[in-house]
Image: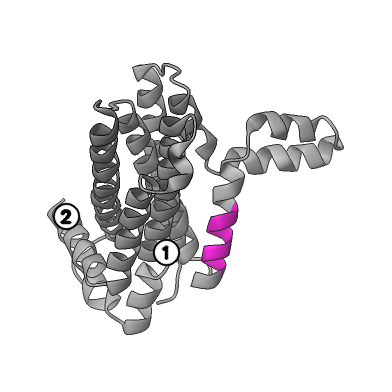
């Protein structure tokens, strides 16, 4: 595991060396803070609107950070030939991918801590209470980023970065597509087409179950068991994606 942690630390240092990383984080913090000072939020349901807008901003910027860190992580090392001394060590390609995944997960987690830390602080100063349930949304945001980064890593050993970006964005939006709409579509198309749609929906990440924002905004309770279930799902799904990435990576001509 020492090699995995070493690669994770290298990935963290590489992320922190990117100027664009700081720009994205700073823009996210500015927009989260700006929501609280916009005059348009002075009318009714202020608290709910502020939370909704802030969580949406955090969701967008956490996705942007994940893509920024994963899309070029492997292709750039292959292009710059820096991957060869790494793989020349007694290091499996699974350890290589796991180290990169772990490093990115830690960087995104730290960024989310900044976003949510600012949000919770501003809500406390504005409303005089500490909205603990939002920490559940922070966990879901982080798990979603872990799943998306694993999906992007799998694609990075199969396609070019532009195609990786397009496919990952499509998977992100389809993953948030409500099941009720999928069932509606399945009831109005031929069985063969329905099988294809249902298989694609099953294979893609079920990000809809990681989106608890609406539930939190309306104050509906969420069972602690639900968080255990979605955590296990996200980690298991990411593990399967990394395993598939390793299979294709071992067959890739470097």
Q: Is residue 149 visible?
A: no
Residue 157 locus on image (x, y percent): 46, 66
Residue 186 locus on image (x, y percent): 78, 33
Tell me which residue sits at (48%, 45%) in the image.
Answer: 40
- Secondary structure mostly taken by the magenta-highlighted segment of the chain: helix
Question: Considering depth in this image, is 59 or 98 the residue closer to the camera?
Answer: 59
Residue range in magenta is 163-170
Question: Considering depth in this image, is 210 or 193 the residue closer to the camera?
Answer: 210
Name the residue beneath numbered marker 2: 5
Label drawn at residue 29: none
Q: Nearer the viewer, mark 2 or mark 1?
A: 2
Tell me: residue 117, above or below residue 254.
Answer: above
- Relative horizontal placement of residue 104, taking residue 7 as reference (left or right): right
Q: Is residue 108 visible?
A: yes
Numbered label tally: 2
Tell me which residue sits at (60%, 54%) in the image.
Answer: 170
Q: Is residue 221 magenta?
A: no
Name the residue beneath numbered marker 1: 249
Tell me which residue sits at (64%, 31%) in the image.
Answer: 179
* Image-quadrant location for residue 219: top left
């Amino acid at each position: 595991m020492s090699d995995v942690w070493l690669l994770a630390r290298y990935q963290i240092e590489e992320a922190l060396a990117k100027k664009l990383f700081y720009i994205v984080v700073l823009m996210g913090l500015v927009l989260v803070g700006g929501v609280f000072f916009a005059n348009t939020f002075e009318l009714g349901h202020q608290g709910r609107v502020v939370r909704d807008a802030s969580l949406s901003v955090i969701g967008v910027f956490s996705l942007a950070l994940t893509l920024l860190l994963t899309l070029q992580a492997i292709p750039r090392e292959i292009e710059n030939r820096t991957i060869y001394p790494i793989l020349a060590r007694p290091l499996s390609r699974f350890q290589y991918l796991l180290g990169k995944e772990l490093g990115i997960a830690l960087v995104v987690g730290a960024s989310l801590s900044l976003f949510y830390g600012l949000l919770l602080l501003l809500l406390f100063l504005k409303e005089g209470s500490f909205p603990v349930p939002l920490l559940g949304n922070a966990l879901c945001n982080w798990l979603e980023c872990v799943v998306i980064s694993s999906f992007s890593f799998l694609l990075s050993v199969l396609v070019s970065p532009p195609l990786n970006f397009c496919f990952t964005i499509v998977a992100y939006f389809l993953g948030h597509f409500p099941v009720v709409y999928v069932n509606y579509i399945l009831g109005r198309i031929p069985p063969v087409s329905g099988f294809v749609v249902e298989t694609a929906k099953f294979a893609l990440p079920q990000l809809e179950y990681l989106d608890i924002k609406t539930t939190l905004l309306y104050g509906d309770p969420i069972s602690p068991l639900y968080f255990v279930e979605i955590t296990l799902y996200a980690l298991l799904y990411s593990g399967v994606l990394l395993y598939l990435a390793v299979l294709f990576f071992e067959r890739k001509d470097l």
